[in-house]
Image: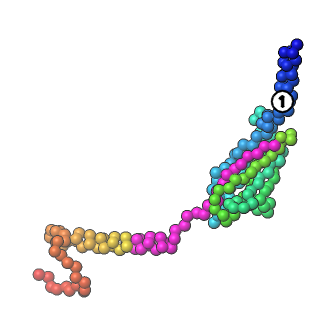
């Protein structure tokens, strides 16, 4: 009899503990799927960001329309804003379950940040995060530009000199053989003198 009482007590304790366990948060709740915008790089100089799009689906993978989705940006450090809406914007999903956080503009702080995406369906919440990075595009310094310009000028001068030497060595009078420049030849500056034919 004592053994039967202990067995009933163990079963009762197990039943109470199972009843007190919280339900599986994913069971019957929505899921947020990232559609676009994750890993995007925003241009600080051009004030150009990438919109974030997500899809909200039910437990069977079916799209959930008219679900309120909130996109929340960090208040400090690398971040952005949604124009007049500031750091957060709430939109409803369409018939495909898609919601888009439009008008994202990066602030002037370079670095990576996370966008928190939340929704709720039948009192069951869902959360996701989207990562983006603010970056300043690489620009050439004035010194680099000067070096590049000098290199172009030097290249043009060398090409002109080579063309002039090639033209001189390639010209010949009719009936004569072109031997090119001699190793000991020199170029003398000044006006050429023209004499009578020999």
**Residue at x 72%, y 61% (from the top left corner):** 76
Q: Is residue 65 visible?
A: no
Considering depth in this image, is 153 or 108 the residue closer to the camera? Answer: 108
Say whether residue 143 is left or right of residue 40.
left
Q: Is residue 29 visible?
A: yes
Q: Where residue 180 sits in the image (x, y, percent)?
A: 19, 69
**Residue at x 42%, y 74% (from the top left corner):** 150
Q: Is residue 43 depicted above or below 182 in this figure?
A: above
**Residue at x 63%, y 66% (from the top left corner):** 45
Q: What stretch is highlighted in magenta?
A: 125-153
Q: Where residue 101 sits in the image (x, y, percent)?
A: 75, 53
Number of numbered discs overlaid on the protein picture: 1
Q: Mark 1 points at which residue?
A: 17
Does residue 121 show up magenta in the picture?
no
Q: Is residue 158 depicted above or below 7 in this figure?
A: below
State which quarter of the image contains the N terminus: top right
Considering depth in this image, is 122 or 98 the residue closer to the camera? Answer: 122
Q: Where residue 156 sits in the image (x, y, percent)?
A: 37, 72
**Residue at x 88%, y 17% (from the top left corner):** 5
The scheme the figure's colours follow is rainbow
Does residue 145 show up magenta in the picture?
yes
Q: Residues within 10 Å of mark 1 (few under 14, many from 20)?
A: few
Query: Of helix, strand and loop, which one carries label 1?
Result: helix
In the displayed image of the protein, which residue is found farthest to the left? 198
Say whether residue 35 is left or right of residue 1.
left
Considering depth in this image, is 185 or 141 the residue closer to the camera? Answer: 141
Considering depth in this image, is 185 or 55 the residue closer to the camera? Answer: 55
Q: Classify residue 192 by image quadrant.
A: bottom left
């Amino acid at each position: 009899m004592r053994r039967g009482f202990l067995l009933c007590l163990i079963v009762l304790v197990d039943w109470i503990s199972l009843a007190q366990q919280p339900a599986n948060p994913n069971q019957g709740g929505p899921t947020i799927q990232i559609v676009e915008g994750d890993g995007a790089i925003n241009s600080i100089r051009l004030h150009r960001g990438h919109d974030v799009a997500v899809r909200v689906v039910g437990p069977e993978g079916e799209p959930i329309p008219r679900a309120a989705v909130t996109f929340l940006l960090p208040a400090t450090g690398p971040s952005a804003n949604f124009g007049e809406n500031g750091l957060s914007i709430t939109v409803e999903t369409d018939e495909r379950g898609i919601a888009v956080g439009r008008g994202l503009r990066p602030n002037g702080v370079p670095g990576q940040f996370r966008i928190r995406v939340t929704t709720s369906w039948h009192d069951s919440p869902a959360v996701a995060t989207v990562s983006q990075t603010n970056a300043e595009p690489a620009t050439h310094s004035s010194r680099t530009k000067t070096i590049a310009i000098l290199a172009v000028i030097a290249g043009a001068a060398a090409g002109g000199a080579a063309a002039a030497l090639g033209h001189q060595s390639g010209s010949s009078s009719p009936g004569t053989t072109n031997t090119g420049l001699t190793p000991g030849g020199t170029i003398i500056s000044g006006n050429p003198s023209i004499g009578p034919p020999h």
